[in-house]
Image (cartoon, grey):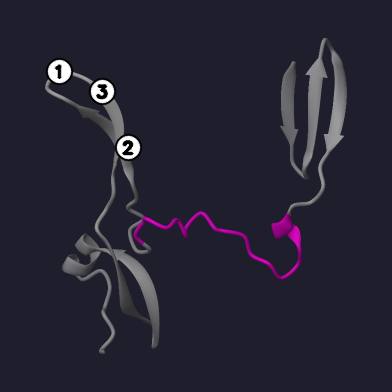
Amino acid sequence: MLRVGRPGGIDAEVESGVAIVLEFAPSFWDQPGLEGPSEESVARSCDVCGKGPVFGNQISHAHNVSSRVWYPNIQKVRVMVGKAVRRKRVCTRCLRSGAVVKAAS
């Protein structure tokens, strides 16, 4: 069975040359006035440079391999955006390099 995705929430399952069209109900975020979680608002990523978690393997001396994650050092900082003050998640490299201007406290 081959499942084929189509835009607009319509999927088709193709089995031995016969297409079966499945239509799904609109999602919660399709309602007017609601915004879904955006690609840019990932919790453990920098709002300035986009640095996020990096995945890899932890390897012991006996070469036992298990997966692990390295997270960037993200800080919540009050930042000047234009003339407004906004709270953003910024990595320490962006803070140190001057990529953002901290608001006066």
Upstream in sequence: badge 3 or badge 2: 2
Q: Main secondary structure of the magenta part?
A: loop
C-alpha separation, residue under disc 1 versus residue under disc 3 = 9 Å
Kind of element beneath mark 2 = strand
Three-letter code for the amino acid on which mark 1 is drawn: Ala
Left or right: 25 in relation to 98: right
Three-letter code for the amino acid on which mark 2 is drawn: Phe
Query: In x, y percent, where is residue 96?
Result: 16, 67
Crowdedness near tag 2: few (<14), some (14–19) or many (≥20) residues, C-alpha within 10 Å: few
Tell me where residue 4 sits by quadrant: top right
Reading the image, the residue beneath label 2 is 55
| Extreme residue in the top direction | 16
Left or right: 91 in relation to 10: left
Left or right: 14 in relation to 62: right
Residue at image coords 32%, 53%: 51
Query: In x, y percent, where is residue 36?
Result: 62, 60
Query: Marks 1 and 3: CB-CB under 8 Å?
Result: no
| In the rendered image, the vertical position of residue 100 relative to residue 8, given as above or below | below
Query: Marks 3 and 2: CB-CB under 8 Å?
Result: no
Residue at image coords 87%, 25%: 20
Crowdedness near tag 1: few (<14), some (14–19) or many (≥20) residues, C-alpha within 10 Å: few
Residue at image coords 47%, 60%: 41
C-alpha separation, residue under disc 3 versus residue under disc 2 = 13 Å
Reading the image, the residue beneath label 3 is 65
Residue 81 versus residue 75: which sits nearer the camera?
Answer: 75
In the image, is residue 56 part of the stretch drawn in magenta?
no
Query: In x, y percent, where is residue 42?
Result: 45, 56
Tell me where residue 81 sits by quadrant: bottom left
Three-letter code for the amino acid on which mark 3 is drawn: Val
Q: Where does the magenta region start and end?
A: 28-46
| In the rendered image, the vertical position of residue 3 relative to residue 70, given as above or below | above
Which corner quadrant holds the N terminus?
Answer: top right
